[in-house]
Image (spheres, helix red, strand yellow):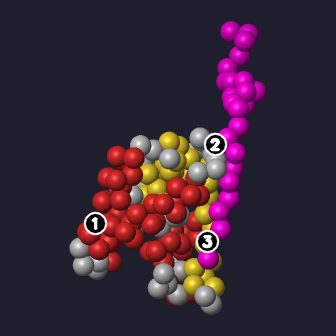
Amino acid sequence: MQLARAIHFDESDQRVFHNPARTGEWCISGGFEFSNWTEGDLEGKARQAFSNGWFGLETSGRVTFVAVTQIEPTEVEALTDLLAQHFVTYYGAPDIAAARSVAAEEIAHMAELCEDHDPNTLLTVARELTPAGVREAYRVIQPQDAGLEQFAIHGSLDD
């Protein structure tokens, strides 16, 4: 099974999200956070989180890019429990048992997004508010083989 981990190429997520996800943490779409939002909620850093932020399962933070990678079944179970607890703590689910099935669905949805992609494939999400609710679209960036010409070399051979 595959899922996605937060990845950072620079420090921009530290500036654009109220709570940035930690590099390497497992992520899901997290669109549930915006289910009751209106245009009035879309300001500043909240707009950025809505527009293109993946949800970090450990920090509840947001990240712009995630990378597809292998996950072990035991990790999936632990993440499902973690997300279920999040639903109890922040969304008023009556208990973990009641929240667990919804948490499992959220993680299964992310696994479906990742299943047909090679490891290290990057994913982005874009959201918009529509009359029917939140619409999500995903972009796939295929992993590239890193050739020597892709690395910057600084200095001089004349030294």
| 29 over 156 or under it: above or below | below
Q: How busy is the neighbourhood of tag 3: few (under 14 within 10 Å), some, or many (20 plus)?
A: some
Give the answer, above or below, for where 59 lies relative to 8: below
Marks 2 and 1: in contact by CB < 8 Å? no
Please report whichever mark, 1 or 3, sits nearer to the chain's N-terminal start. Answer: 1
- Residue occupying the point 61% across, 63% down: 125
* Residue located beneath label 3 in the image: 136
Badge number at residue 85: 1
State the separation of the CA atoms marked 2 and 3.
22 Å
Name the residue: 60% across, 82% down: 129
**Residue at image location 65% in from the left, 68% down from the top:** 137
Q: Which mark is residue 118?
A: 2
Pointer 1 or 2: first along the chain? 1
Q: Earlier in the sequence, mark 2 or mark 3?
A: 2
Kind of residue sitting beneath label 1: Gln
* Residue 5 position in % (x across, y down): 49, 49
- What amino acid type should be assigned to the residue bearing mark 2? Asp
Tell me how far mark 1 sits from mark 2, CA to CA. 31 Å
Q: Can residue 79 be seen in this view?
A: yes
Asked where in the image residue 133 lies, by quadrant, the reply is: bottom right
Residue 42 is one of the magenta-drawn residues: no
Residue 120 place in picture, x, y as percent: 60, 41
